[in-house]
Amino acid sequence: MATRELSGFPARIFDLQGNTIYKCEEGECIRWLVAEGSDWYALITRNDVTYRVVKNGKKIYGSDGKIWCFAVENGAFYLVLEDSDHKVWACKGWESQQDKGSWYCQQLFEVNDGRLYNTFIVHDGAIVMAMGGAEPAISLNETIHPMNEYLDHGFNWVYGIDFYAGYWLITYEDFETRKNMYWWKNAINECPQYFQPTTSRIVNGHAFILGQKTSSQGVGSIYGLPAVLIDGIETILSDDLMGFEAVGLASHGIDTYILVSHSTGSISCIYKNLKAIRLPDVKMPYVLSPYGSNYSQDGKTNLASIGITAIAVVDGTKEP
């Protein structure tokens, strides 16, 4: 579990026993946390100026260009990088087979206008992005595949894209109607009224769409509660978490973990199989303990009050 930085308390990665797995330097934040097998990868940034990729606590790549997105497949990492000339590139990084420990990153292709690189996946080595605009399409690397025969309109925004067993899950805002929609198992579906997606993913063959149930759609909404759609069935995770939304997802075997955070990022919780789990207490100086936390006499405060930014599950452990 990656946490935000507090003044004098750098961003860190904890396990569910409260042990520190990794500690950032001051001024850094963890933008992405990904696990593959027994390895974990983190994308770390300093003031949105310098970026680095860490694998199991060791730096494997650094860049002065802005990294927009990050993914891992078969031991290689992929990212969308904006260089100093404001050109955006899809890149791949890998470890040299001849010189173990040396990592290289290659620009694969320029991300042209229209590709919605805020969300992408890697499938069998291909970087997959949706194409924004009136005509629905997706791109696999540099090749564009129109989807007019499947979708009525194009994508104004894409919250998530995933592929499993021959089916696509694409969660998006419709270009023409501005309604929140999702395409799953070759069918177009509209999200329930007042459901605002944040991200989506296929888990064990099921379509998970995370988000928030608001009091009204879009601008002017008063409050929200964390919610999830699973194969189109809506579940509000808690009626007590006003102002929270479901923002992250990790899975391990049959278990699914959902990260829920307040809109300010100050308070977080994790749901395992749709039930809230107890987060550990971690040692923290009293003067830095967030307001409203349950700081105890033994110098610990609960991880939920620090603010969790990302979660991942590594093989060989039972918890994220």
Image (cartoon, rainbow, N blue to C red):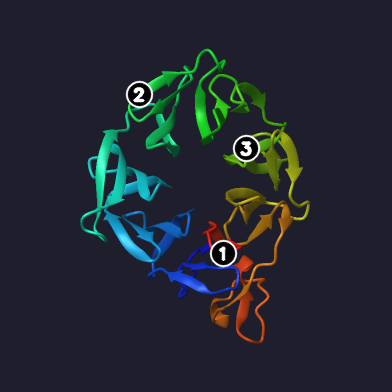
> In the image, which disc is placed on residue 188?
none
Residue 284: image location, x then y, percent: 55, 79
Q: Residues within 10 Å of mark 2 (few under 14, many from 20)?
A: few
Residue for badge 2: 143
SS type, badge 2: strand
Residue for badge 3: 205
- Residue ranking furthest to the top: 149
Residue for badge 1: 317
Say which quarter of the image contains residue 177: top right
The answer for how far apart the CA atoms under marks 1 and 3 are is: 23 Å
SS type, badge 1: loop
Say which quarter of the image contains residue 45: bottom left
The answer for how far apart the CA atoms under marks 3 and 2 are is: 27 Å
Camera-nearest residue between 297 and 314: 314
Residue 190: image location, x then y, percent: 67, 26
In the displayed structure, 18 sits above or below 298; it is above
Residue 28: image location, x then y, percent: 39, 64
Q: Mark 1 belongs to which amino acid?
A: Thr
SS type, badge 3: loop
Nearer the observer: mark 1 or 2; the answer is 1
